[in-house]
Image (cartoon, rainbow, N blue to C red):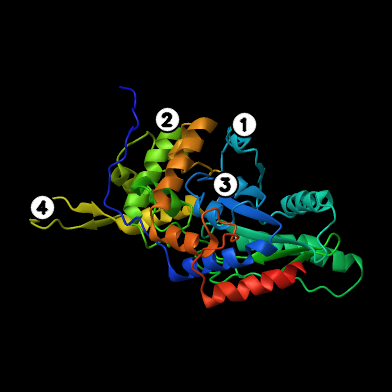
Amino acid sequence: MAFVPRRTFPNYNLPLANFKGHHQKALTKFGHLAPQIDLVLEVRDSRAPISTTNVIFDKVLAHKQKIVLYSKKDLSVLKKNLLDKWHAQENEQYMFIDARNKKDATKVIDLVAKHYRSLNPPPPLGLRLMVIGMPNVGKSTLVNSLRDVGYISQLSNNRVSSKRSKVARTGGQPGVTKATSEIIRISESPDLLMHDTPGVFLPSVKDAETMLALSLVGCVHSSFIDPVVQADYLLYLLNLQDPKGKLYSEYLPHPTNSIMELLHGIAKKRDVLKMTKPLHWSVGEPLEETFDELGMANHWVNLWKQGKSPKYKGLFDLSAIVETNGEALREIFQQEKERVGTMNISEKITDSLGNDGSGKEKHRKRTAKDREYDLKNRLFKI
């Protein structure tokens, strides 16, 4: 009988919120800095391009020109023609990048420089950028690459000592960057300056599958969701992408919908199966095979999350797997904006920046910090 992959995933009772204090502070800082920003670079993980889209950014940084960068292209099988359909609806520019790749960093700088040259007159204090995105999508890695390719390379060409060092901290878990950086120069010719920012989570995601997708790409801490549930969701998605089971054939010779069968195969492959006595064991009865379920689940999920080899490439967004069209995607994001719009955080943003997010409305609830930045922004424009 032919194998039939699961068409639905169990609705586990998972936490849907991972919004932290520094996320709120970052959003407030975005609003304060917005008048100084000429261009926004929004980074999304190309393995979960929909789940790693944060609709709050459109409210905080309203009316700002944006380039969407899909990171970790070396780990994704996302189709370019699908992105073309999605972004044609919004008339947005986008790029597929590997944030560690110098060629890709050069392409980003070239695209930003093109935007700089299109401005008449050019910004007297340089083109100011802000890189934003969900946690752990590669923002700080990108900033380091841009700095390395742009500014440091220019110093090297001018025969000035240029020790290559990170200007932004990076790490394997989310939350390494907890505050918006001071301005970082990434190029002198043209003059490009950038703010690195913390990853900002949604106050809550819409459903468990979105949280699982974010967990699989590392947007939440590895301990936030049960590893076996993560592994089961990964198995569910991989079966939808390849019902023949080739994506895990090194552990099982046939496809399966059972995560425990797969974890047993992983333990067997790694030679960590143990023979133990069952609870009511008697002399002469066979021993029972056991293994560390959590350990095997963590091991397998991390292989995909970190892309330990070229074969660990996939998609973790169900909407991307079924190739949702541009119109349907717009509807998804519109519903998400309406959902997030009912949350307290949206009220705070509206109080501070106004209904249109521009910060130009007169009747707003202003804090002392807001007024301080209003003054700074007026001086910045003089």
Please tell me whether mark 4 sits on a helix, a strand or a loop. loop
> Which badge, 3 or 4, comes first in the chain's sequence?
3
Q: Quadrant of the C terminus?
A: bottom right
Q: Residues within 10 Å of mark 3 (few under 14, many from 20)?
A: many
Separation (CA) of disc 1 from disc 2: 25 Å
User: How many circles with numbers are drawn on the protein?
Assistant: 4
Q: Earlier in the sequence, mark 1 or mark 2?
A: 1
User: For mark 1, what is the residue?
Assistant: 81
Q: Which mark is residue 376?
A: none
Q: CA distance from mark 1 to mark 4?
A: 62 Å
The residue that mark 3 highlights is 75
Compute the Cα span from label 3 to label 4. Answer: 50 Å
For the residues bearing labels 1 and 3, Cβ distance under 8 angstroms: no
Q: Say few, some or many: other residues with alpha carbon within 10 Å of mark 2 (under 14 / 14 to 19 / 20 or more).
A: some
Rendered image: mark on residue 284: 4
Task: Name the residue furthest front.
Answer: 363
